[in-house]
């Protein structure tokens, strides 16, 4: 197939390479000319694209001549500052409906569950309490509206990879809250194998979760991780009323995907 990856950065590039090895042609977008040049060196058809660009331009035709599209544009803190982010996503999806694209994978986030506590599954109610969570949920609804049973959404826990780990940003910080809440992380490699499984096994019309199966406390895990990487140990406040926070249970999704996590525990990720 020809697969378009709209938003081909930290996750999209290794995903594209893996799909390419399986015989697919990859069309990939990046916001910068330099980023596109790199995509071309990987053997992709790199297209410069910023959300909100005119969709009628000829240089974007390769996107709309694809068979399948992976929507992977992260919702940043300023994404909806001017109120146009969702409108631009809506325009893109409307254009896709009239194209040759028949299937869509949307890369979403477990932030759509907000600050709920306890174990959460695919069937748990959503309650986003951040702008990112709210926008992701609205995009999920748009994808469902336009593609219904021809689309699948992946709600990802915190992403970790060889060059990306949250302890880097926590190292040396003090007075960190919620020491006893649980860690919900997933490795880049497991995200890639999950998306490949969706495509290979034609798992459509689903909303799926992805998270490691083990959920240590923030204090225990990030103290261990900092020591492991020889970083300054983050300091947490004492919490009088312990709370587990939310625990993402992705077991049903993992069974449906028919995969075995390569990183079933956050302790495997370093």
Image (cartoon, rainbow, N blue to C red):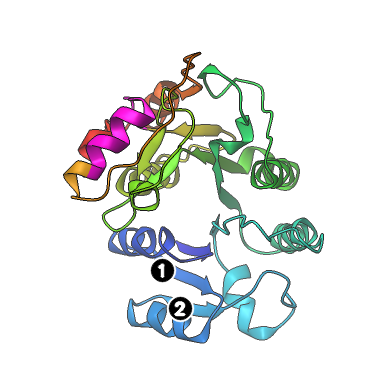
Q: Which mark is residue 25?
A: 1
How packed mark 1 is, by other alpha carbons closer than 10 Å (few <14, some 14-19, many 20 or more), is: some
| Left or right: residue 94 compared with residue 203 | right
Q: Percent x, y for residue 56?
A: 74, 78
Q: Foreground: 82 or 202? A: 82
Name the residue tied to disc 2: 45
Q: Which mark is residue 39?
A: none
| Left or right: residue 106 compared with residue 126 | left
Q: Percent x, y for residue 264?
A: 27, 31
Pick the quarter of the image with the N terminus. Answer: bottom left
- Rounded to the nearest angstrom, the CA distance separating label 2 from label 1 is 8 Å
Q: Foreground: 134 or 4? A: 134
- State if disc 1 and disc 2 touch (CB < 8 Å): yes
Span of residues in magenta = 212-226
Q: Is residue 54 magenta?
A: no
Q: Foreground: 48 or 150? A: 48
Secondary structure of the residue carrying numbered label 2: strand
| Residue at image point 27% right, 48% down | 232
């Amino acid at each position: 197939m020809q697969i378009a990856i709209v938003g081909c950065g930290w996750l999209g590039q290794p995903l594209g390479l893996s799909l390419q090895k399986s015989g697919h042609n990859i069309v990939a977008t990046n916001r910068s000319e330099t980023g596109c040049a790199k995509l071309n060196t990987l053997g992709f058809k790199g297209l410069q694209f910023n959300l909100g660009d005119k969709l009628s331009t000829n240089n974007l035709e390769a996107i709309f001549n694809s068979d399948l599209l992976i929507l992977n544009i992260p919702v940043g803190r300023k994404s909806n500052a001017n109120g146009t982010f969702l409108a631009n996503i809506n325009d893109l999806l409307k254009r896709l409906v009239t194209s040759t694209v028949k299937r869509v994978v949307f890369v979403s986030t477990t932030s759509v569950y907000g600050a709920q506590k306890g174990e959460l599954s695919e069937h748990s109610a959503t309650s986003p309490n951040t702008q990112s969570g709210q926008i992701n949920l609205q995009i999920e609804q748009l994808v469902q509206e336009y593609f219904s049973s021809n689309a699948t959404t992946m709600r990802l826990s915190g992403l970790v990879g060889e060059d990306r780990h949250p302890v880097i940003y926590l190292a040396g910080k003090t007075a960190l809250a919620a020491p006893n809440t649980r860690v919900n992380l997933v490795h880049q490699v497991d995200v890639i194998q999950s998306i490949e499984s969706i495509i290979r096994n034609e798992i459509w019309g689903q909303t799926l979760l992805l998270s490691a199966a083990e959920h240590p406390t923030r204090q225990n895990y990030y103290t261990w991780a900092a020591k492991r990487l020889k970083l300054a140990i983050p300091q947490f406040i004492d919490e009088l009323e312990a709370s587990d926070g939310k625990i993402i249970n992705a077991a049903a999704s993992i069974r449906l995907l028919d995969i075995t996590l390569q990183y079933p525990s956050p302790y495997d990720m370093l």
